[in-house]
Amino acid sequence: MEVLLFAGSLQVGSLNKKLLRIVKKYLEDKKIKHTLIDLLDFAMPVYNQDIEKSTGIPATVQKLAEYIKDVEAIIIASPEYNGTISSPLKNTVDWLSRCKPMPLTDKQLLLLSTSPSQFGGVRGVWHTRVPFEMLGVHMYPTMFSLERGNMQFNEKGLLIDITVEKRLKKLIDAFIVHIQKFEKI
Amino acid sequence: MEVLLFAGSLQVGSLNKKLLRIVKKYLEDKKIKHTLIDLLDFAMPVYNQDIEKSTGIPATVQKLAEYIKDVEAIIIASPEYNGTISSPLKNTVDWLSRCKPMPLTDKQLLLLSTSPSQFGGVRGVWHTRVPFEMLGVHMYPTMFSLERGNMQFNEKGLLIDITVEKRLKKLIDAFIVHIQKFEKI
Amino acid sequence: MEVLLFAGSLQVGSLNKKLLRIVKKYLEDKKIKHTLIDLLDFAMPVYNQDIEKSTGIPATVQKLAEYIKDVEAIIIASPEYNGTISSPLKNTVDWLSRCKPMPLTDKQLLLLSTSPSQFGGVRGVWHTRVPFEMLGVHMYPTMFSLERGNMQFNEKGLLIDITVEKRLKKLIDAFIVHIQKFEKI
Amino acid sequence: MEVLLFAGSLQVGSLNKKLLRIVKKYLEDKKIKHTLIDLLDFAMPVYNQDIEKSTGIPATVQKLAEYIKDVEAIIIASPEYNGTISSPLKNTVDWLSRCKPMPLTDKQLLLLSTSPSQFGGVRGVWHTRVPFEMLGVHMYPTMFSLERGNMQFNEKGLLIDITVEKRLKKLIDAFIVHIQKFEKI
C-alpha cells in the first residue's frame, strides 16, 4: 500500500505544504510507503480543450497520472481560495480527468486544509470534495482543518500544539486502517 | 447601465460562447449597453501567490478588472468541469480577488450554462456561485441550464427550439429589470 | 420597508434566537420596521405531499406565508445541523414552497449563524442558502457566523465582545442600505 | 452482509419508493440480505433539542437506529426538495445524529434519486451527501438520478427502459462488490 501526498497550493512557503511534511514524517514513523510531490514540478496550462486537441494532454499531466496510478491512496492538503477549491487543484483535477484510463477512479482520498483564517479552510474542503467524487474517488468522510495555520508551526516546521498533532495523527491512523482493509483482500 | 459578458471556457468553439452570442444579440435588440469579451484574450497563469509577490498581478488580470469595474452587471455562461466550476473560470476569479480594489464587489451576476449532457451544467452552476458570493457579488437567484447544447444551435448559431429561446429571453428580461432598479436610484 | 426575523432552531434557549434579539434591538434603534417571530409558534408536520393533498397546506404555514408576504426583507439566524441546513428550517422552506403565490419570491434575505463550535455555523450557511436561491430569493452575499456562541452573550443577553457587535451592526447597516435601494424606487 | 433500503420521501406513491422496489427485487435475485423500510413507519417530530431534553430521543428514532446498526450498507432513494435534501430525510438524519452510539458512523451509503423533472434530482443528491459525510458515512461516489420518473415505470412498477434498468443494476453491482470487500476481511 502506497500513499501519494501533494498540496493544492503552488506557493513555495505554503502552509499546506508544511502540514504535509508533518504527515510525511508520521508516515515514515509508521513505515507506510509514500511519496510527497509538489504540483510546482508538474506545471500545466489552464485547461483548454483546444490545447488537448492540438498537442494532447501535457507531459506533466501524464507524469502526474503515472504517480497516481501507482498508489492506493492520496492525501491532499489544500487551502480554500474564495471559499472553495483552489484554482491550482481544480485545474489539476480537470486535466487528470482527461487522461485515459482516468487515474483517480476508485482511489481513497483524505483531505486536509489549513489557512491563516479562524476557519482554516473548513468551508473550502466541502466544495473541494465534489470534483473528486464526480470522478469516482472514495473520499474519506472525516477531514482536518487547521485554523490560524500561520501560528501553528515552529521554526523547525513542527506543530506547536500537541493536541492538534494528536488530532491529526489520529485521523491519519484511522485513514490508514481504512485503506489497509482494501489492501488485505 | 452596462453588462459584461464572458464564458467560463477557453475553447474557441465553446457552446457557452455560442449561448452568449445569442444573449449579445438580444441585448443589442433591447438597446442595452454591453461588451462581450473572451477569456482567451486575458491569458493568465495558474494562480500562485509567489507570482503575485515577485512580478505582481498580471497585466491581463488588471485589464479584465478594468472591464469589470466599468459595468453594473455581468452575465457568465460556463460549462461545469467535473460537476463544479470550470478551472479557467475559477482561476480568473482567484486572480481577480487579489486586485485592489476588488472589482467584483457589489456587481450583479447572472449565470448561464450549457453542455452536451442531459443536465446542461445544472450541477456546476450551484458550485460556480460560491466564490462569487464569497466576494460580495449579488448572484441573480434564477439561472439557465441548457441540456444537449451540441444539438441546440443551427448553422447560423441560432437556437433551434423557440421555447428554449423564449425561456432564455424571459430570464434576461427579468435580470435587466432587476439591475435597472438599482440604476434608477 | 419591513423586515421579518426568525431563527432556524425551535429550541427555547437557542443561541440564534439570542443573536436575533440583538439584531431586533438594533433595528429598533435604527427605527426600521420589523417583526421577530418564533417558528415554535408555527408548528408544522414534517413535509409529506399526502398531507397537503388530503388536508391542504397547514394553517400555520399559511400564517407564516402571510408574514413573509408583507415584508421586503428577511433576516434568518440559524444553526447548522450536521454541517448543513437545520431540519426545522428546511421543513419550513419546503412547506412555504408549496404556497401559491409562493411568498419567498424576490425577497431579500440576510443569513446569520452562531453555534458553540469554533466555526459558528460557517459551513452550514453555504448549504442553507441553496433552497432559498432555488425559490428566487435574493441572498445577501455577505453572511455572519459567530463562533463559540455559548460564550458570547452576557446575562442580559448582550454581546460581550464589542468588536463582534460592531461587525454585526456593520453588516446589518449594509443590508439595510441595500434593501432600501429597492424601496426608494 | 446486509443492506437497509429506505426513501427520503414520506409520500405513499413516492417515485423513489418505486425505484427502491426495483432495487429490492434485484437484491433478492442476487441473494443479498436486505430490508426495505418506510420512514412513514418511523414518524418523528421536527427536531427540537428541547424535546430531546424533556422526553428523550423518540422511540421511532431509536428503532430506526437499531435497523441501521445491524447493517453494513444503506441505499437511500430520495427526491430533492427545492434543490437540496428533502426535509423528511434531513429531519431523520438530525435525529439519528443524536443517538449514542451514533448508528451511521462507518456505514457505506449509495444514493439514488428520481423526480418528474428533466434533472431527476441530480442537484439535490450533491447536497444530500453532506450531512451523511459529516457523520462519518462512506458515501459511494457514483450516484444514480432518473429524470422524468413519472414516465419511467409501467403499471407493474417495472422500469420501462431497459437501458435505464441496466445502468441501475450495474451501479448496484459495483456498490455490492465494493461493500463485500469490507465484509470479507
Image: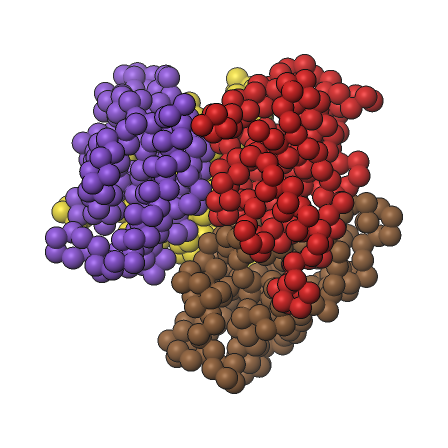
Chain colours: A yellow, B purple, C red, D brown
The image shows residue A9, relative to residue B80, as above or below, that is: above
Measuring from the top left, give residue B25's x and y in whole percent: 19, 42
Measuring from the top left, give residue C154's x and y in whole percent: 79, 21
In the image, C23 versus B114, the foreground residue is C23
Quadrant containing the C terminus of chain B in the rendered view:
top left
Q: Is residue C144 left or right of residue C17?
A: left
Quadrant containing the N terminus of chain B in the rendered view:
top left
Measuring from the top left, give residue D7's x and y in whole percent: 60, 66
In the image, D71 versus B151, the foreground residue is B151
Residue farthest along the bottom direction in this orientation: D156
Q: How many marks?
A: 0
Tell me if I can see residue C170 in this picture.
yes
Q: Quadrant of residue B86?
A: top left
The image shows residue B64, relative to residue A62, as above or below, that is: above
In the image, C120 versus D115, the foreground residue is D115
The image shows residue D151, relative to residue A142, as above or below, that is: below
- The residue depicted at 57 percent of the width and 38 percent of the height is C125
- The residue depicted at 81 percent of the width and 49 percent of the height is D52
